[in-house]
Image (cartoon, rainbow, N blue to C red):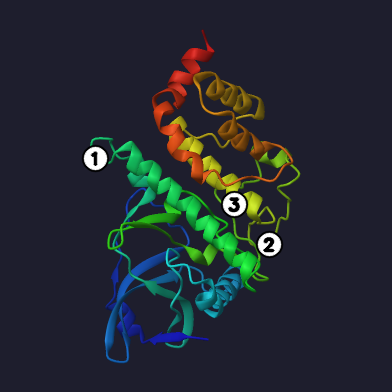
């Protein structure tokens, strides 16, 4: 177990990390710190949990340790993995991870098109899908079999301004090994997905509701994509309205292949990662939004 131990005085000198007001962080406070490794000073982030005891915290510690143990095997550079656990006066409080200068993906997707082009935004969404494909290969070709991001939504991805690549953050909510599944924004106990049996209910004592697998991951990713093009939340749209929307997409010229991939999320058929097809949606962007769809629907 890798642990950085800070004194209370050292901790009190740390400066809180400024996060965007659009990034909700209800479970921890983030601090900027310099981590000394032999002769090197490395900029790091301390994620100090508000609650440092109980079942949720214990599950976090298990998750972080499992990630540390599997870090070299996983080897996906786009994942911002933990570097070590952190204690203050020998009491565990959280963990350290690399400091990444960044912009949050949600802010990038919501930016005005004069600032960030539609093509660039779609490329960022595609990079999220590529990360999921890389994780699938880890599960297929290594002994790290039960490893999923779990809580997939726009705020849990950033643009690394050093590499200009999308990175996944908040890995302490990942599903790995025998940990309990943490809550996931798009996998709540209400909504149309609750009627689809491939999303296996598995409510646990720390707030998770579903058995996390490739289907739940692609479901959350697909919701991310569709909400971007729709321009509003779709998470509570009824199944009937969802399929009316898909019929509308087919009517305006979106390919049957893409529509079929989207339609999978509410039927008992394995979901397909749609990342390879996202550029094909760009010409339809202006007609895929909620206002245009509802105007055509209500004629």
Q: Marks 3 and 1, Cα distance to the nearest angstrom?
A: 30 Å
Q: Residue 9 appears at what percent x and percent y? A: 31, 84
Q: Is residue 4 visible?
A: yes
Q: Residue 68 appears at what percent x and percent y? A: 52, 78
Disc marking residue 205: 2
Left or right placement of residue 35 versus residue 198 in this view: left
* Residue at 70% across, 60% down: 204
Q: Residue 79 appears at what percent x and percent y? A: 45, 65
State the residue in front, 275 or 172.
275
Please name the residue that numbered disc 3 is placed on.
Answer: 217
For the residues labelled 3 and 1, say whether their Cβ atoms are less than 8 Å apart. Answer: no
Disc marking residue 115: 1
Question: Which marked residue is nearer to the observer: mark 2 or mark 1?
Answer: 1
Q: Secondary structure at mark 3?
A: helix
Disc marking residue 260: none
Above or below: residue 156 compared with residue 142: above
Left or right placement of residue 281 versus residue 6 in this view: right
Among the 4 quarters of the image, the one containing residue 30: bottom left
Q: Marks 3 and 2, Cα distance to the nearest angstrom?
A: 21 Å
Q: Secondary structure at mark 2?
A: loop
Q: Earlier in the sequence, mark 3 or mark 2?
A: 2
Among the 4 quarters of the image, the one containing residue 180: bottom right
* Residue at 40% across, 42% down: 122
Q: Earlier in the sequence, mark 2 or mark 1?
A: 1
State the residue in front, 278 or 240.
278
Mark 2 nearby-residue class (10 Å; few <14, some 14–19, many ≥20): few
For the residues labelled 2 and 1, say whether their Cβ atoms are less than 8 Å apart. Answer: no
Above or below: residue 213 compared with residue 285: below
Q: Residue 292 appears at what percent x and percent y? A: 44, 19
Mark 3 nearby-residue class (10 Å; few <14, some 14–19, many ≥20): many
């Amino acid at each position: 177990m890798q642990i950085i131990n800070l004194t209370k005085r050292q901790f009190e000198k740390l400066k809180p990390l400024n996060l965007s007001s659009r990034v909700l962080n209800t479970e921890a406070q983030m601090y900027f710190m310099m981590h000394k490794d032999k002769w090197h000073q490395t900029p790091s982030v301390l994620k100090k949990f508000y609650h440092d005891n109980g079942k949720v915290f214990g599950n976090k510690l298990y998750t972080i340790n499992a990630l540390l143990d599997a870090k070299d095997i996983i080897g996906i550079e786009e994942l911002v993995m933990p570097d070590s656990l952190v204690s203050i006066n020998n009491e565990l409080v959280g963990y350290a991870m690399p400091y990444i200068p960044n912009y949050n993906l949600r802010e990038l997707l919501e930016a005005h098109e004069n600032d960030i082009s539609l093509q660039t935004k779609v490329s960022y969404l595609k990079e999220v899908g590529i990360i999921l494909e890389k994780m699938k290969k880890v599960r297929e070709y290594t002994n790290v079999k039960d490893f999923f991001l779990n809580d997939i939504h726009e705020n849990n991805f950033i643009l690394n301004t050093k590499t200009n690549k999308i990175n996944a953050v908040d890995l302490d909510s990942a599903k790995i090994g025998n940990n309990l599944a943490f809550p996931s924004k798009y996998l709540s106990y209400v909504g149309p997905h609750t009627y689809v049996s491939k999303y296996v209910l598995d409510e646990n004592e720390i707030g998770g509701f579903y058995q996390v697998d490739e289907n739940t991951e692609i479901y959350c990713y697909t919701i991310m994509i569709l909400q971007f093009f729709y321009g509003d939340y779709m998470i509570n749209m009824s199944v009937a309205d969802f399929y009316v929307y898909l019929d509308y997409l087919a009517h305006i010229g979106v390919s049957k292949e893409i529509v079929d991939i989207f339609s999978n999320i509410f039927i008992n058929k394995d979901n397909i990662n749609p990342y390879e097809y996202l550029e094909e949606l760009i010409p339809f962007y202006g007609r895929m939004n909620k206002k245009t769809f509802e105007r055509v629907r209500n004629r």
